[in-house]
Amino acid sequence: MASPEHTRKRILDAAEALFFQQGIAVTGVDQVATSAGVAIVTLYKHFGAKDNLLREVLSRRLDAWTRHWDAAIARADSPEERLLAIFEAVETFRAAANPTQWCCFLATASERPTPEDGRTDPVFELIRQDTQLVTERLAQLAEDARCTDPAAVASMLLLLYNGVLGSLLRGAPSDPLAQARKTARLIIDSLAQASPDQAKES
């Protein structure tokens, strides 16, 4: 008999594959249950509703993405390389994660209406957390790399990051990560302050 943890993982794996290959709106929980090999009542016992299932899928993706980015930063050997590590993290994350058409968070945002003023949406809260994580971490890494305007660098690299994710869906350019790295390096080099040692030499 499968453990609850194993059953839960099968349901999440099935939901992730269906939501982000076929689409969230067109995928019913009955399809997810069938794909996971569980009864519909078992799915509801674990998750209660489709929105809860979607939220759990996104939460799991965000945790996995953060671990890959942490690891890529840890492998980098300079502040500039730590700032560029986001692109290595995309590569390693995609190699390890379940296949999807493109970014699960952008896919969810594209299908889901923005909450009305004053209303809470736990799914949109995860999208906000993902955006905040990327923006704030890039700004801190840009500051560590002595960029003259860390917030501006973070915004430009976020634009490149979003462009990579969109290009992976479009299929062109064929190697968006390599091109994004080159462009990001140009941005960093143009907006980096001289180190104290470099300043003394000039």
Image (spheres, rainbow, N blue to C red):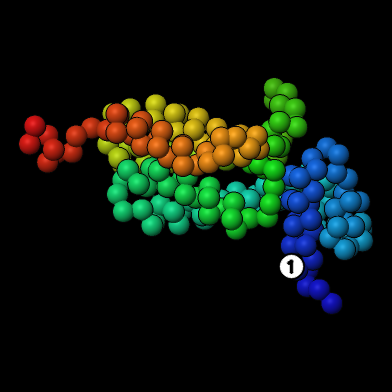
Quarter holding the C terminus? Answer: top left
Residue type for callout 1? Glu
Q: Tell whether 12 sits left or right of 140.
A: right
- Choose between 34 and 41: the one closer to the eye: 34
Q: What is the count of numbered marks?
A: 1
Is residue 114 positioned above or below 161 on the image? above
Q: Quadrant of residue 172?
A: top right
Quarter holding the N terminus? Answer: bottom right
Is residue 24 positioned above or below 33 on the image? above
Which residue is under mark 1?
A: 5
Inspect this view and state whether residue 165 appears.
no
Q: Position of residue 141 (x, y in %)?
A: 37, 41
Residue extending farthest to the front is: 174
Q: Position of residue 36 (x, y in %)?
A: 84, 60
Q: Tell whether 167 sits left or right of 196.
A: right
SS type, badge 1? helix
Q: Quadrant of residue 163?
A: top right
- Identified at 33% across, 27% down, the residue is 149
- Identified at 19% across, 34% down, the residue is 194
- Identified at 45% across, 29% down, the residue is 155
- Choose between 183 and 27: the one closer to the eye: 183
Query: Badge 1: how crowded within 10 Å, few (<14), some, or many (20+)?
Result: few
- Identified at 79% across, 66% down, the residue is 7
Q: Tell whether 65 sits left or right of 138.
A: right
Inspect this view and state whether residue 71 appears.
yes
